[in-house]
Amino acid sequence: MGSLSASPSGRADGDVIHPFQPYVSKPCYWDLIRSKPNLMGGYIWDWIDQGVLTTNSKGAAYLAYGGDFGDKPNSGNFCLNGVINSDRTPNPKTWECKTLFQPVAFEAVDLDTGKIKLINRFNFTNMKDYSIHWNLSEEGMIVQQGVLDSMDVSAGQSREIKIPFQPLENKSGKEQWLRLSVHETHDKLWCRAGFEIAKQQFLLNEGHPVSARPERALSIKEDKTSIQLNGSGFAAVIDRSTGELSSYKVGGEEWIKSPLRPAFWRPQTDNDAKGGKTQKLMKYWKELGGKLTTDSVRMERVSETTAKVVVKKRAEKTDLVITYIFNGNGEVSVTMDLDSDPTLPPMPRLGFSMGVSDEFVTTHYFGKGPWENYIDRCAGAEVGLYEKSTADMYFEYAMPQENGNHTATRWVDLAGASGTLHIEGDQTFGFSIWPWSPENLESAKHPFDLVEQGFYTVNIDHKQMGVGGTDSWSAKALPLEHYRIPSGKYNYTVRLTPLH
């Protein structure tokens, strides 16, 4: 069992930041505070969650909150509003705070020549007391690195510095990043020498697609209930009644345990439920999946190696077209075209969800990590190459809710004994993986209420709204306007590819 924490969000009252829901609008506060010399703020109200470690009737340990002891009235889990877990371990909000508060900053001047502006935010300390490290990476793998000479930059001052990296050719198609970090050079009461106090990433070269594999022949069989597509070592099925990808077998093994479906709802965060009341405001999107009717499922043979299936769905005020393109190698491109009435409320999530085999025991991804992050709480996460047990891809909150998201994802590999399911998009996307159903996650009050379903829920999001607001008890608990997803027209493509 992972560390138990409060919620994925943070709240703010004036200049006092609560971490109750996750530090979403805090970067906006700090941009403003640092732009005005007479502004102060960003104070953390509750530093530590205040859960009470206890056991349930079956002897399972959990963090109790208001109401768990038969106490009435109570404030529920409102006491779990810190940036540190109840057991004093850090959580994703901790790392976000660390990055936003960091006393040194870097700004790009001319990345091609390695010129960077160093800004000393300390009030009294000279930068010569710290070491500055740099590295250059391709697709998350370090290819050059070094340590700069001591920098004499007084408190409150800035200086242009040059990073002595050797320019890299970009023939491989891999993304190239420059990373800078500042470290303590001596032991302190609170840390050891080498502790990192600040960091920054800069994108040097964007990646580009590599050449595709030669395509194999694709066979197609249709009947009244399904469209069956077979190629080199794979077989897929589209259900005619729903238009969903209901089966995807590779090497005879079923990789999809629950159909690939459009997703518009997320298990509510504390901010969603308590202040934002998305169960009322965004009820349309919670119910949309069950109200969409399938108008048509049409198959078109494009070539000997490729076929296209176009699914048209509709509901009141929404038209949805899902287009699948299959090739004989087993690659499936899935495009969502959504056209929803602009007068509808914003949606919590826009993407796809599916169940995959629990045989995929390891997750590799290239995106923001290693801890969970959201569009308005991702300053502390870094684009990199990460690997983790699929069973541990979630983050456990004391009151279960939306969790484990990773933004700015380039690709995800789910690896198991029968092969690897590679997921990528036409643009960066968000993803999360849970061993439970979204419905179970939303209804659970404690981690012991979560029941593993025997397969993994994989969410692949074009967009997901932010997780924090300016308070947590009113409509202001919703994320700021630019972190919401307005109803309207959207186009989104993901690709599933089997790797052996």
Image (tube, rainbow, N blue to C red):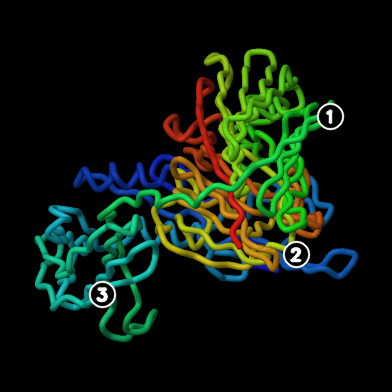
- Place of residue 231 in the rendered image (x, y in percent of width and height, measured from the top left): 67, 47
Task: Residue at 17% x, 68% y: name it.
Answer: 166
Q: CA distance from mark 1 to mark 2?
A: 47 Å
- Give the residue type at disc 3: Gln
Residue in front for this viewpoint, 410 or 195 = 410
Q: Please tell me which of labels 2 and 3 falls first in the chain.
A: 2
Q: Is residue 468 visible?
A: yes
Locate the C terminus and report the quarter of the image it occupies.
bottom right
Q: Which residue is mark 1?
A: 225
Q: Which residue is mark 2?
A: 62
Q: Tell whether 222 sits left or right of 166.
A: right
Where disc 3 sits, the SS reads strand
- Give the residue type at disc 1: Thr
Locate residue 153: give its quadrant: bottom left
Q: Is residue 7 visible?
A: no
Q: How many marks?
A: 3
Task: Residue at 90% x, 64% y: name it.
Answer: 57
Residue in front for this viewpoint, 38 or 145 = 145
Badge 3, how many Cα within 10 Å: few under 14, some, many 20+?
Answer: some
- Give the residue type at disc 2: Tyr
Q: Which residue is mark 3?
A: 145
Locate the N terminus and report the quarter of the image it occupies.
bottom right
